[in-house]
Amino acid sequence: MAVSVFDLFKIGIGPSSSHTVGPMRAALLFASGLKRDGLLPAVAGVRAELYGSLGATGKGHGTDKGVLLGLMGMAPDTVDPDAIAGLIQQVRADRRLVLLGEHAVPFTEKEHLLFYRREALAEHPNGMKFHAFDAQGASLREARYLSVGGGFVVTAGASNSQVIAAHDQLPYPFRTGRELLRMAEDADLSIADLMLRNEQTWRTEDEVRAGLDNIWRVMQDCVTRGCGIAHPEADGELPGPLRVRRRAPELYRNLTQRAERALSDPLSVMDWVNLYAMAVNEENAAGGRVVTAPTNGAAGIIPAVLHYYDRFVPGANREGVHAFLLTAAAIGLLYKYNASISGAEVGCQGEVGVACSMAAGALAAVFGGNVSQVENAAEIGMEHNLGLTCDPVGGLVQIPCIERNAMASVKAVNAARMALRGDGHHYVSLDSVIKTMRETGADMKTKYKETARGGLAVNIVEC
């Protein structure tokens, strides 16, 4: 369970929060635990086993790289994306892995990194096991982890009492949209101000704002790189057999070179929103630095809408950026509490749909909407993503993921505008649409939930 804005927005690497970042964090936890308990010197071999969606689409989602990096001691928020290819190549060439950069063991991927495409752990579709052995082959430790979406990792069977305790110490411990609205209205606070008060349970206000500035900075850097600004390597094709051409740099050049035409096209702002979203998701697909928002597969939506606010809305400022991120996080927490943000669990409605809902509510807030209008915008953003499947072609976070982020970004802007044209009263509550999303995900066939066994993943010809 998440409780903080910094739980929802985490700095990591592409292409997937659940399939790259999560396994990387799990592998690091496992290796660190061996060292903490004094077992590391006795380790003569390790093995990782990947189940469910991780087993089905892990190779296309960079799960193998994530596991290797984590075992080597790398963390998603600090690893240098430009160094990853060399680190992985060294392991493969040497057939040797240096745990935490300290203790070397033999490592051959076909023997020590296993993908089980048709098997799943009972607790979650994104399950993994790690094993450590001594020189005689006896087990030193076995651990099971679940990558539950958005880079969140939990130990299978572990108690969540610490997280519950952290939630209960908040001054405004909301769990539903109804509670959030009531608490904000009773205290005469905006949703952003309420979240800021909660964040100050663990950090000073200056620390919270500095953290938000850093998140925004990484989002901006990601757009800059994805547009090819001073980064010519952004031109060309994305990794993988699909040979998908990166479109953001060309679109950026087109928009900047023909700026005058925008004066005669009232919808030209949509081109910029599309650009921001595609730039982020192309960087994500290339394994670059991104912010999970709330996942990597949906990482382009919140940055795109926030760039729209920053670049096109008169009066946009730093406080508005903070309010946007805090409001978006409050909405995202509701989905995390009451449903899921894992495409492997509920389909892409839990990733792109949730990000659209978060961005819509946040934009309504910085446009001056009251808490009811913010809730309405968030509800609209999800209501019209219900049933969205996760069907990545070739198991890669490219088709339809990149365009899907652009479409949802524009949808979020429209949802906010629709809500602001009303007075906040509406028939379908955010709580109701979250419940519906969870139930729809439960009814959705497994082949439509990040397994690459249904939908577009099987209905286009790979050339």
Image (cartoon, rainbow, N blue to C red):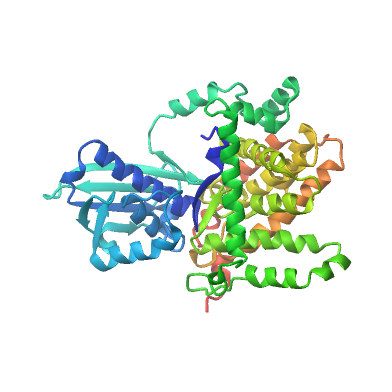
Q: Position of residue 10 (x, y in %)?
A: 52, 45
Residue 158 as seen in the image, left or right of residue 225: left
Q: Does 345 sit left or right of 67 as displayed?
A: right
Q: Is residue 401 visible?
A: no
55 w.r.t. 264: above or below: above
Identified at 70% across, 53% down, the residue is 307
The residue located at (70%, 51%) in the rendering is: 305
Q: Residue at x 69, y 49 (%)?
A: 306
Q: Residue at x 58, y 70 (%)?
A: 459
Q: Position of residue 283 (x, y in %)?
A: 55, 62
Q: Give the image location of residue 178, x and y in percent.
A: 70, 28
369 w.r.t. 89: above or below: above
- Between residues 179 and 21, which one lies in front from this camera angle? 21
Tell me residue 120's x, y (percent).
Answer: 40, 50
Q: Residue furthest bottom?
A: 463
Quick one: 348 or 41, which is closer to the camera?
41
Q: Is residue 416 left or right of residue 227?
A: right
Q: Can residue 16 be seen in the rendering of this structure?
A: yes
Q: Number of labelled discs?
A: 0
